[in-house]
Image: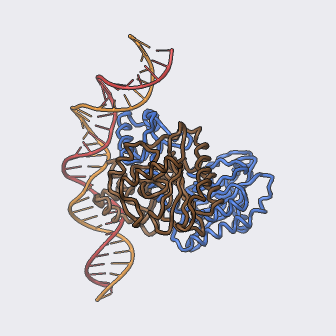
Chain colours: A blue, B brown, C red, D orange
Amino acid sequence: MTARVLDVLGAFTAATPELSLTEISRRTGLPLTTTHRLVGELAAWGALERGEGGLYRVGLRLWEVGALAPRGLGLRERAMPYLEDLHEVTRENVQLAVLDGAEVVYVERLAARDAVSIRSRAGSRLPATATGVGLALLAHADPEHVEKVLAAPFRRFTERTLTEPDRVRHLLGEVRRTGVAISEQQIEMVSQSVGAPIRAGQGRVVAALSIVVPIEANPHAYVPAVLAAARGISRALGASALATQP
Amino acid sequence: MTARVLDVLGAFTAATPELSLTEISRRTGLPLTTTHRLVGELAAWGALERGEGGLYRVGLRLWEVGALAPRGLGLRERAMPYLEDLHEVTRENVQLAVLDGAEVVYVERLAARDAVSIRSRAGSRLPATATGVGLALLAHADPEHVEKVLAAPFRRFTERTLTEPDRVRHLLGEVRRTGVAISEQQIEMVSQSVGAPIRAGQGRVVAALSIVVPIEANPHAYVPAVLAAARGISRALGASALATQP
DNA sequence: GACCAGCCTTCCGTTGTGCGGAAGAATGCC
DNA sequence: GGCATTCTTCCGCACAACGGAAGGCTGGTC
């Protein structure tokens, strides 16, 4: 029955953070009565909250428990000073992400006012092969895992989105050599990103950061600043036993 | 049985973000077999993750769902530019919090390198009456709710921590008049905070921000900057129907 | 190398808790 | 006022969750 509780929580998305009881029932496929009961129990604990209009939303208590995730806010807490430095120095969007299967999950995103707009937000996911952070993470991931990722279907956003496994393998080799991943126009035609891996104890790559700049900009100009921030965070994590990815 | 699943999640704390199976069983009072089964189901979904040493921790998937909480990351996402402005201009610690019962929950905290150290982190809680953000929130809360809060036992941190209901009532009146809450030496003897309410659609107070400075500083000097940031965030939230507190 | 303590995993008989259809209340729209 | 939709409550039923027992695994001690 645990699965049902989690299905209810999984019904909420970034696009629809507030749902009616009936809508939750529809999305989870559970009978209305069952949904009513589960939602009531989740609300009593604080995992869900009910607004004035009768719509349910994720509650503060769940956010608090979620905030204990070492790979979530735990990571961003320690990375934050370096992200802010990079953000201040470059005046561009800065992102921090971890690998989860074939996707990256954005743990933090510092948007810049006049910068090119980006579609990620904290908590959102994108395919690893289509992002600077993802390429930086895959370049240092277990080769078996990389092959699994490349064997799965690719998701396309623009005509520049990578879709051939061999091109990705080649690019990952370049990333390993240069230490940075440059991803051009894969998500939006107007932007590119420069990503670098972040290491924790024993040198394992546990996260990546990237800066997102307009396609007209020279990405190589940002490489020193991105690498400096990534190294700063890596040093900050050096004493921590933050676990590696699968 | 929903309660058991949530009890398992509730076993994790900021002090102990990683737990063994036996420890989870101990903390929740559940038999080992039951704990094993529930933890396995939570891990299969991604709400928990198991590290190499066999310890469990809150998983990314739960953080992602938690990130959908409008009163959590939803709020901070929109507040962030103003928090960063305040942070940059003042070079002090900046916090964003919401009221939950008799406590405030910190949704964001921007620490400053050379600033007085503070004990809150995103996801942590403190009594509302003992903090700048809490006083700013209570000043504009439903009077019945305020009386409930004042009727409960007070938690003391320093000899300056407020513990008399009448003094709090008086102070809340001042906060309503001046628009800001100054909380001196209530949590740590070396610091004080300046808090201001943040309003959403229809003028309801839904959150508060504060700046934490050394006790030697003149708190009134920060009032204009704090109010400006609070008003900026309030305007940013004006178009949103972010719900009010209970 | 043997032994022990502590932790974790698997099995399986038992039972009580979760299930969900039915009926009705509430709300908003025409 | 009638209707459609959503939400709430009741309660008989059955099966999925329960958890003790047994055993495996690991690391430390002698």
Percent from the top left, x then y, of residue D23?
Answer: 28, 68
The answer to whether residue C20 is left or right of residue B77 is: left
**Nearest to the observer: residue A4 or residue B19:** B19
Percent from the top left, x then y, of residue B132?
Answer: 49, 56
Percent from the top left, x then y, of residue A240?
Answer: 52, 71
Q: Is residue B174 above or below residue A145?
A: above
Name the residue: 74% across, 48% down: A160
Percent from the top left, x then y, of residue A243?
Answer: 51, 67
The answer to whether residue A23 is left or right of residue A33 is: right
Name the residue: 41% across, 66% down: B158
Residue B125 visible? The answer is yes
**Nearest to the observer: residue D18 or residue B108:** B108
Q: Is residue B99 above or below residue B113?
A: above
Name the residue: 54% across, 38% down: B201
Residue A102 visible? The answer is no
Number of numbered callouts drawn: 0
